[in-house]
Amino acid sequence: MSTQHITVTVNGEAREADVEPRLLLVHLLRDTFGLTGTHVGCDTSNCGACTVHLDGESAKSCTVLAVQADGRQVKTIEGMADGATLHPLQQGFWDQHGLQCGFCTPGMIMQAAWLLEQNADPSEAEIREGISGNLCRCTGYVNIVKAIQQAAVSLSEAASAPVVAGETTEGQAVSAEPAAAG
Ligand code: FES
Ligand code: FES
């Protein structure tokens, strides 16, 4: 079986592989690169469990061939946290109990992250529309929406924090958290 050599930057790290032309991106991520946070729920583009970012766009990785990702940037759920600090969406899902079995959660978070990049202050209706391609069979979506709303507030505060903290912070590391005066 012929293979094609590809290089994909995954979560900021260049990864190489020899792949069959029929290999799906989701299987490249999971089986070749060991990034099993991206889930396979259907393989037919219905559930959204496989959602990743491809060159900054939300993409269902079961609908993309691995060879189509050659030379491109992929971000997965493993690339969301900053070390031990959860991404605001991860924190939101934790705080708001936005999951039960958790199977849909990585795809839900990746889709929500893309949504918040397009619209930093979405209404509930816009959130529900934005995640309409991601199916959850457990939660009823109420707490998922709350999680995304919490993250929207956190991201907004984080984005405004450096401007608010325009005064010099000599000798102090700049925190990504909303600044507590003093
Ligand atoms: Fe890709 Fe379900 S596994 S949409
Ligand atoms: Fe179980 Fe969403 S938490 S499918």
Image (cartoon, rainbow, N blue to C red):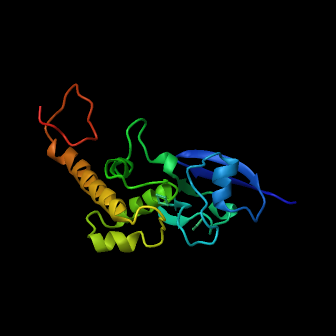
Residue 139 visible in the shown view: yes
Residue in front for this viewpoint, 76 or 93: 93
Q: Is residue 43 left or right of residue 112?
A: right
* Rendered position, 70 above or below 44: above
Residue 148, given in percent of the width and then of the height, sits at 33, 59
Residue 54 visible in the shown view: no
User: Residue 4 lies in what quarter of the image?
Assistant: bottom right
User: Residue 73 lies in what quarter of the image?
Assistant: bottom right
Residue at the image point whose x is 43% and y is 57% from the top: 109
Residue 92, given in percent of the width and then of the height, sits at 33, 51
Residue at the image point whose x is 64% and y is 67% from the top: 43
Q: Is residue 156 left or right of residue 84?
A: left
Residue in front for this viewpoint, 100 or 152: 100
Point out the image quarter for the C terminus: top left
- Count all numbered tags in the image, as a single digit: 0
Residue in front for this viewpoint, 41 or 53: 41
Q: Is residue 109 left or right of residue 65?
A: left
Residue ranking furthest to the top? 171
User: Residue 74 lies in what quarter of the image?
Assistant: bottom right
Residue at the image point whose x is 18% and y is 47% from the top: 163
Point out the image quarter for the N terminus: bottom right
* Rendered position, 86 above or below 29: above
